[in-house]
Amino acid sequence: MTTTSAPPPQPEPKRRVGDRVFAGSAKGAGILILVVLAGVAVFLVTEAWPAFTASPADLAGGEGVLSYVAPLVFGTLLAAVIALLIATPLAVAIALFITYYVPRRLAAGLGYVVDLLAAIPSIVYGFWGIAALAPALVPFYGWAERNLGFIPFFAGPASATGRTMLTAGLVLAVMILPIISAISREVFSQAPLLHREAALALGATRWEMITMAVLPYGKSGIIGGAMLGLGRALGETLAIALVLSISGGISFNLISNTNPGTIAANIALQFPESTGLDVNTLIASGLVLFVITLAVNMLARWVVNRRADFSGAN
Amino acid sequence: MKLSTTTRTVAVSAALAGTLALTACGASNESSGTAASGGGSSASSAPQLSGTLVGAGSSAQQAAMQGWTAGYTTVQPGVTVNYDPVGSGGGRSQFLAGGTDFAGSDAALGDEELTQAQDRCGRGGVFELPDYISPIALVYNLPGVDDLNLAPATIAGIFTGAITSWNDPAITADNPDANLPSTPITAVHRSDKSGTTENFTDYLAAVAPDVWIGGAVQEWPVPSGEAGAQTSGLVAAVQSGEGAIGYADESQAGDLSVANVKVGSDYVAPSAEAAAAVVENSPKVSGRGEYDLAIELQRDTTGSGEYPIVLVSYHIGCIRYDNQDTAELAKSFFGYVVSEDGQQAAADAAGSAPISDTLREQAQGAVDAITAGS
Amino acid sequence: MSTSTSPAPATTSAGPLGSISQHRRLPRFGAAGIFAVGAAAGIMLSAVTGFALVLAAIYAVVLGTAGLHVGSRLLEGRRTAADRLVTALVRIAFALAMVPLVWLVWTVVSKGTARLDGAFFNQSMFGIANEGGGAYHAIMGTLIITAVTAVISVPVGLLTAIYLVEYGHGKLPKAINLLVDVMTGIPSIVAGLFAYALFSLFFGPGVRLGIAGAVALSVLMTPVVVRSAEEVFKLVPNELREASYALGVPKWRTIVKVVIPTAIAGLGTGITLAIARVIGETAPLLVTVGITAVTNLDPFNGRIATLPVFAYYQLTRPGVPPEFAVDRAWTAAFILIILVMALNVVARLISRFFAPKTGR
């Protein structure tokens, strides 16, 4: 099918009123988006500015806005990276399963079921995380502390409630799994038919066909999907606020009850009771989060677009 | 011909809105809401008021506020009281900015805020009613130990992480008879900013200044221990972790054990009476308006039968409102809140401690002073 | 295009990479049999070490897979063994992904049905101190705010998509394209803070309005609408547009009468999914709309209760005793899931029934 980003030139030189009104309102809508985004950026910067200029002693923590945000950035990245490490291989496997291992009739239904995971509101994930997942993981954390304690990640002491960084990462992983798998599925199903059939015709097993014809083609799609999932994980708010036991500080220990917070969860937890400069500090942390997610999304877009440029598929 | 999606969506939305308007006869439990008509200034003894009173602030008060609004409905069915639990700081700033009619706050107005209140309320100033008192209990989960006594320094040691196991000498010294296990202690604190944390740390800072170095703060200052979001998160964390101890409103303790705290030479359990007693015996903050009942809590009290870890939440409003209706609504509502009925409604709904009669008289005086006009 | 691969011909003996001269296959149920033997061994192992359901399942799956791999390797050779291993792993991955979904739905259903009664749907929290009460006000509020959000972001999103696809030359569309990407990445709580600041500029601090929540949600929803609409507009064949121009139809009528009707199925699906995406948002509504116990149907006046915020507050700030509020919270979460799933079903139906009728 042809993609149409460049419609044919104007059929006639005379511009009708209807055309002008329609084109104008379409353009206006586009500009509105520009204005809104500028509004968001301006608001974030102006509201965050007092926190940057204030004397560090007046801020929460008393050491300036950067040392306030640093552990939060660490926590945000740690939770998101855990989620990504767990979710990406699973999501790719699921995408392969749905595209190449089940009958086509079934595939649509199964894909829909996985997509349902994406549709569940994040607060429900939070509810589930504290009520079901965290308690269920307590025995595992105890086992991990006893048997894997030599690895710094599992140094312990194991949390007695299961509300740890690893639990938060798992909840996030479940949340971003459908995003990564949807995009992977998309690119896998677009892998050139000729390549695939050629591989099979040469006697390759299904796995060999996938390694030869599908994965090389879909690699950047997977990376792009993972980056979009990462963006979602970075901005997740209430699921983390409910599930994670946040004590502050920087720690690589994944199974203890002392965990760094994440930026978004910290805003949700501290904003209601904050006034004055504390609000500015929180908004400054929101600005940092905005910049991080922006960078991740840009990276994802760049990777995905690069694939489009180099693919010889169509 | 097909409709464009835009028109279609608009049509669908319009249809939806229409359906809503049709079904919008209201919730079945609100049907009496429109019964009363206007006219508060007519001279009948108990005029039926109507209108909306808007407040915002302390989330600690929310459950009590549900009790108050529920009870108040039976007195004045025509009045709607909206309370937004945005948090104490937010409630105070919204009130001072004129966004709401009253604020609920876990702390009295600061000096700077009092100056702002001059602009908000004019020269009449503000009233501050300490009419929500909730004892904060030390809840713990230690099977086999139903009775636990803790001295202030021991509590501070537990929550700073200096005391790490339940059979620590400091704890056994307080509990010579108890059979304490060697279970490690998990100290649970609130992960969100809260008035409960502020009152608890204020207590620690007052009674154990040598051990507790974090000061009185809303956000937990020590980077160690388990944390739970909101009271329910904290209680859930204590419930699910053996050896855990935390601080929460006594009413939310559920089936958790509650520790006795050393006051003077006795060990006192949190109770409504003990909490009301410490509030009544604490001095007012000096140099404030006549109806500003802000109190200076005596955390280091040694009086017998007083429990010093309490959360006192205020209702803050104007003595003079610009609007006649608002003034009457506020007068009527807070009159109910400080009344015995109102305090009992809060106790039923939130497990708070009813205020003492002395305090009620003072509060009633402040409520009677509410007027309109600038 | 077929996604199911035709089975590799068993007779092919000379593969492109392999050095296998003979390609034996296990009989039809052989693989399953080997897996079952391994799984049984796993269950027995867990029985020896003290039976636990989860542990037994893990042992069974691991040993079954290992057994299958080893068996296949001995009987069928290295390449087929690798293929079988991957097949097993991929199936396990799918099953693993189903675990949280089923678990989550089960948790919410089992806890959420406690208060799934008539009162929950026709009562608000007005005058309710502990027992009883309902979420009528919150359900209505969610529907109203979502409707207002759709009214704002669907036209803006569609027009922007039309601009990008049909008028998209030059620097401005390129910039807008980029900014839509940026907008997709705005964390929801930041969108809420933005809307709050915007409205507090006009109405003073402490403002809580349904419309502010709708604006916050629109910031999140509009880019989703733009992206999905853009995709489907691009799929409309150029020939249709050219035919329309050739008949002398002006461009705007071509778009309204040809492009949009052709793309209607995709648009409907995309918009419905975008609504499903924002209907469960909690964080932005917490700071913009607040909560109230009474029914308020006017988005331009005062606080409105919404289902996610209602659930959040009922769970985290219960009254005494907490059970009643916690039950209400779970039921609200349950209704939220039902709403979202219903929207997903609607999206499927739209794409099925409004699929472009090319044969006309």
Image (cartoon, helix red, strand yellow):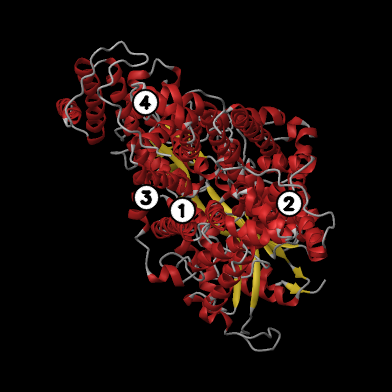
- Circle 1 residues within 10 Å: few <14, some 14–19, many ≥20: many
Q: List x then y, in percent, for residue A296.
A: 62, 31
Residue type at mark 2 is Ala
Query: In which quadrant is the N terminus of chain B drawn?
Result: bottom right
What secondary structure is found at the residue carrying circle 2? helix
Q: List x then y, in percent, for residue C228.
A: 59, 48
Q: Earlier in the sequence, mark 2 or mark 1?
A: 2
Query: Residue at label 2?
Result: C197
Closer to us: A32 or B81: A32
The chain containing the residue under callout 2 comes to C
Query: Residue at label 3?
Result: C105
Query: In which quadrant is the C terminus of chain B drawn?
Result: bottom right
Give the quarter of the image for residue C5.
top left
Task: Tell which tag, 4 or 2, sits nearer the viewer.
Answer: 4
Mark drawn on residue B39: none
Give the quarter of the image for residue C82.
top left
Task: Tell which tag, 2 or 1, sits nearer the viewer.
Answer: 2
Query: Residue at label 1?
Result: C315
